[in-house]
Amino acid sequence: MRSEETSSWPFEIGEWLIQPSVNEISNSGRSLRVEPKVMEVLLCLKNHASEVVSKEMLIHTVWADRFVSDDVITTTIWQLRQALGDDAKKPRFIQTIPRRGYRLIATVVVHQASPAEADPHKHVSPARQHRFLKAGIFTLCALLLMLLLWQAVRWRNQPQLQHNRAPISSVAVLPFRNLSGDPSKEYLAEAMTDSLITDLARSTQLRVVPRASVMQYRTLNRAAPDIARDLGVDAVIEGSVVASGERARISVQLIHAATDQYLWTESYERELRDVVVWQSEMSRLIALGIGTGLKLQAPAGPVDAAQTPAAAREAYLRGRESWKRRTEEGTSMALAQFERAVQLAPEYAPAWTGLADSHMQMVMLDAVRPEEGFPKAKAAALRALQLNDALSEAHASLAMIKLCFDWDWLDAETEFQRALALDPTYATASNWYSQYLWAAGRADEALREAAKAQELDPQSIAILLNAGNLFFLRRQSDQAVTCFRRILELDPKYVVAWKALSRAYDQQSNRREADAAYLRFRELTNAPSVARMKEEFAAWSQKRDAQYLVQKLSFAWKRKYVRATYIARLYADLGDRERALEWLEKAYTERDSNLLFLKTDGSWDSLRADPRFASLTHRVGLAS
């Protein structure tokens, strides 16, 4: 039988008889009339008894997909619990499932009623009418009381300081959930999370948990007080994004950890183009909810986003999501998004920084030559700094360009330190600075900076790869294996990690695992085996035409561009010092950034006694 045919039938939950046709619940002669929406919520929970019913399902079922704020649902559930005499902390009827929804946990018994029984107001005797009148008066009083309590809840949820609780001095912004059913909107949830963390962290009175520490709760289903206890904070902020077409609803809650109570809750229905307005408005209201004395410091330099068209901002956010993939395809997509952003908003400095990072990354991925990619990257970074000299990301980008292409070690370190002074939480700056420190021979400092980058962003593939490579170069192969394994947990098809893992296992003399990892690398790239590569290389090395050699290597490795240092390293392995040095000179002409590690890479140990190698080291800026 269809559920709509039985929706008006009476049913029991626990000691309560529920009569949906008249929006009434009764227990031992006591009857209460509830609001129609309260009854509809109860019916929705009953129709999915023992299942978790999300807020989105309630909105769809009860409010017909209208945009309603979360406090409406919270208040409706509260009214239902009050009517049933239920306790949210020790529920007998309705259980709150943190960050997911609600569940009816009481046993449901449905009465198969006749039409007359389904409507108890038909054929009612005078005596029963008198009882209904008394019950109605009682119900009216109860509803008036509930209305007063509901208004109190509404007042409580307004952004004001509650003087009967301890002040909030620390907070964690949990990852916003993308409830749109569209993975392409994930960037919006991440943008909201990052923006709130950045804005609230500007307060000198409030400790805000770094982004990296809260990201683990993206997939963990834990209650707010438990998370707050883990992180040692007084309150947590959680939220969700539901985007459809050109509109979206953002819901945000500030939860007091000690009492598990909502201190402030709000929902916004806006056009997507107003994303920046949401972020600043939410930060301001949450600051008020935390305490009237809390002040958010204005960001240093121009507020780029506030005057930026929404389409440019969205293109920038999408570009950053693609850039984080650290693949040639992802970086190409990022370039297209950043170029769109600067076309729409030529004064938007972060988009110019994104362009700089993408052009630089294409070089690092061997997709373009250094002399092609780095000048474009440098021009974009300088443009970003011209627009906003207080932008940490732009200083970090310029630092990396000065290091890898200009070989200007002094200016590079100055820019790294400037970037980290402006934003100590910018994990990419710490990651890149660790590479600078390692190349300069400052190994202990490099490992400390790499550890800091990991702490700031433990999910970053680029940061894990760098840490693993540093451990490998220091012959700490166990730690290197751990880093590379973690990357493959995040992305099982990340080919660079499989190759790096093979090298790390080889350093451990674990041939079985090294071969297995390299086999997987070959499966993903169609690369030739090491043995065959060296055999073919030995044959090719007799040829005088260096361009022919480069073409053969390029074909073998499925590369558009082969670094001269790769070929020099193979010659060094074969013991051909002359040709190794010859190819290192070609690498110098091409501005191959691998030359930065001449001082610390053991591959060149056989060449160190040669004066030509010492000269090259000096020209790169690595003289002691």
Image (cartoon, rainbow, N blue to C red):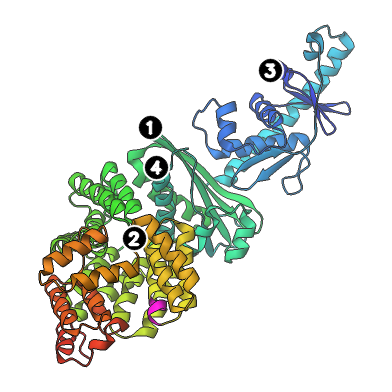
Residue 492, visible in the rendered structure: yes
Q: Earlier in the sequence, mark 3 or mark 4?
A: 3
Q: Secondary structure at mark 4?
A: helix
Q: Main secondary structure of the magenta part?
A: helix
Give how far across and how far down residue 97 sits, in percent: 65, 45
Q: Which residues are magenta?
A: 470-474
Q: Secondary structure at mark 2?
A: loop
Amino acid on which disc 4 is placed: Ser
Report the residue marked by disc 4. Answer: 184
Amino acid on which disc 2 is placed: Ala
Report the residue marked by disc 3. Answer: 2
Between disc 4 and disc 1, the foreground one is: 4
Give how far across and how far down residue 174 sits, in percent: 51, 55
Mark 1 vs 2: CB contact within 8 A: no
Q: Secondary structure at mark 3?
A: loop
Q: Residues within 10 Å of mark 1 (few under 14, many from 20)?
A: few
Check if residue 56 falls in the magenta segment: no
Report the residue marked by disc 2. Answer: 298
**Residue at (83%, 6%) from the top-left corner?**
123
- Closest to the observer, 12 or 281: 12
Q: Earlier in the sequence, mark 1 or mark 2?
A: 1
Q: State the separation of the CA atoms marked 2 and 3.
A: 58 Å
Q: State the separation of the CA atoms marked 2 and 4.
A: 31 Å
Q: Is residue 92 left or right of residue 322?
A: right
Q: State the separation of the CA atoms marked 1 and 3.
A: 33 Å
Q: Is residue 164 left or right of residue 199?
A: right
Q: State the separation of the CA atoms marked 4 and 1.
A: 12 Å
607 vs 266: above or below = below
Q: Secondary structure at mark 1?
A: loop
Residue ranking furthest to the top: 123
Tell me the tag on residue 245.
Answer: 1
